[in-house]
Image: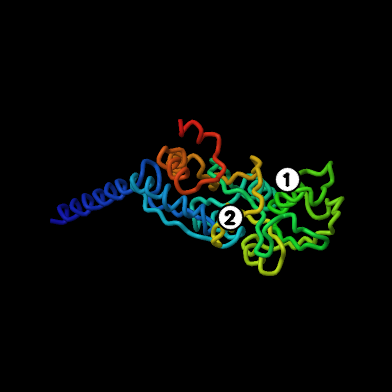
Amino acid sequence: MKKITLLLTLVTSLLSALLAGCGSSAGGQKDLKIGATAGPYSDQLRKGIKPLLEEKGYRVTIVEFQDYVQPNTALLSGSIDANVFQNTAYLDNYIKEQQADLTGIIPIPTVPMGVYSKKHRSLDDIREGTRISLPNDPTNQARALGVLQTLGLLKLRPDADALHVSEKDIVENPKQIQIVPLEAAQLPRSLDDVDYAVVNGNFALASGWKLSDALKLEQTPKPYIIVLTVRTADKDKPFVKDLVEAYRSPSFDELIDREFQGFIKPEYAKEVGQ
């Protein structure tokens, strides 16, 4: 009798193990948490990526963040499995400063940075002492200063690295523009207090602004295209390959054309759209 009981226990354990194995993808997990800043990138995930992953059996949770600090902290701690919020320049700088073991996997459709105002309808209104807010993190501040230089509002040191310039690199400011550095997520709110703001597109859209509201949109350089990011140890796992496949899918490309007009598409999207 004891032998029969032992045999039944072994069979039950074996069946449990087999069923557990059936509940996961080939060599990978089924529960997937993806972090993104609130706005267009979380919307892209929710509308275009999550459904495709669910078709493959994943249980997808989208975790929204309100700043540029928490998403990488959460990824490194294992609280999430991937994030979508940062551009290549930001990621490279973060890896260098934090010795972070993260890897950018694939560029995604990116909303351009823009100049917005509640008080003015034109950049022609810029006068001496005009107050302009822009991001205070090094990467996006350099990006915003580049936008202001393109507009002819200031001149940056010509020998400075365009990806790492700061206020210290301003060599000409003929209208004595007052630069107001703020956390990127706070820039839309700052429009009540400043004349203009150079705002990251995701935060502009999340605050109810449209791209057509911008007085100027940047021609987004390649280093500022948003990238899907994972822990380096996970970069070859099945869930990462499935994420890449979803971003490169025709259905996701159609979603971008339909609901995210004006976004800068990665090079691979040209092949998908053919």
- Residue 53 vs residue 230, the one in the foreground: 53
Mark 1 residue crowding within 10 angstroms, few (<14) / some (14–19) / many (20+): some
| Rendered view: 242 above or below 63 | above
Identify the image quadrant of the C terminus: top left
Residue at the disc numbered 1: 163
Q: Residue furthest left?
A: 1
Q: Position of residue 1 (x, y in %)?
A: 12, 56
For the point 46% across and 38% down, which residue is it?
A: 248
From the top left corner, tell me how far across and down residue 126 is, in percent.
77, 58
Residue 49 % position (x, y): 42, 47
Considering the numbered disc 1 on the image, is that residue within a helix, a strand or a loop?
A: loop
Identify the mark at residue 72; answer none if there is no mark.
Answer: 2
Q: Residue at x 65, y 58 (%)?
A: 116
Residue 41 as seen in the image, left or right of residue 90: left
Amino acid type of the residue tagged 2 in the rendering? Asn
In this rendering, the answer to whether 69 lies above or below 229 is below
Label for residue 39? none
- Whether residues under marks 1 and 2 lie with C-beta atoms below 8 angstroms apart, the answer is no
**Considering the numbered disc 2 on the image, is that residue within a helix, a strand or a loop?**
helix
The Cα–Cα distance between marks 1 and 2, rounded to whole angstroms, is: 20 Å
Disc nearer the start of the sequence (1/2): 2
Q: What residue appears at the point 43 percent right and 41 percent down from the top-left corner?
A: 254
Q: Is residue 179 left or right of residue 11?
A: right
Q: Label 1 is placed on what type of residue?
A: Leu
**Foreground: disc 1 or disc 2:** 1
Task: Answer few, some or many: residues within 10 Å of disc 2's Cα (few below 14, many 20 plus, some between 14 and 19).
Answer: many
| Residue 255 image-quadrant placement | top left
